[in-house]
Amino acid sequence: MEDIPIIRRFQEDPSPYFEMQNHKELRQTVYSVEAALKRMRKEKAGPRAIKDFKEDNAIALKMLGRVKAIDSTLRELNSAIKSVQASSKFNRAEKKKKLERLNGRKQELLRETQKKFVDLVNEE
């Protein structure tokens, strides 16, 4: 199957760019819902309006904690990647191996987050 170009295209894992773009879109949605909820509370919207808003945006609110945790972990991983790239104590092969491991972890986190989001959407 890998020899058939069209099938191979659909069979391959998504690119790191695609996964990061999905995460950025999810993060934007989740943070904008959080900001809207804060604004409603600040403007003293009625309890019914806040309840309705929470019900309408339940998935985004469920994802909020996870997205914040993933963002924190991604910052740590990006910092580690920069450190490895700038380091002179590793040879080229060691750097490559460490960078592959760190980037693999990033991709794994992004996939897990997207899967959790899709699972929540499918539950509704």
Image (spheres, rainbow, N blue to C red):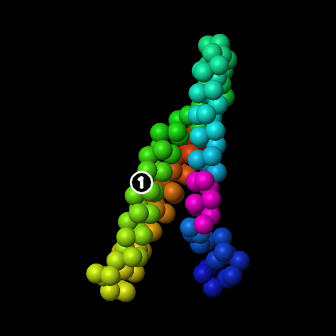
Which range of residues does the magenta coloring cover? 17-24
Residue in view at x 69 percent, y 82 percent:
5
Residue in view at x 64 percent, y 38 percent:
32
List the single residue furthest toward the right: 6
Q: Position of residue 84 (x, y in %)?
A: 37, 74
Q: In this view, does 73 lie to the left or right of 44?
A: left
Q: What element carries label 1?
A: helix
Q: Is residue 15 left or right of residue 109?
A: right
Visible residue check, residue 40: yes
Tell whether position 23 is magenta. Answer: yes
Q: Mark 1 points at which residue?
A: 73
Q: Is residue 70 left or right of residue 54?
A: left
Locate the N terminus by quadrant.
Answer: bottom right
Tell whether position 98 is magenta. Answer: no
Visible residue check, residue 55: no
Q: Is residue 96 left or right of residue 51?
A: left
In depth, the one of 36 and 109 nearer the eye is 36
Q: In which quarter of the image is residue 31?
A: top right
Q: Position of residue 33 (x, y in %)?
A: 63, 35
Looking at the picture, does residue 21 appear above or below residue 99?
A: above
- Count of marks placed on residues: 1
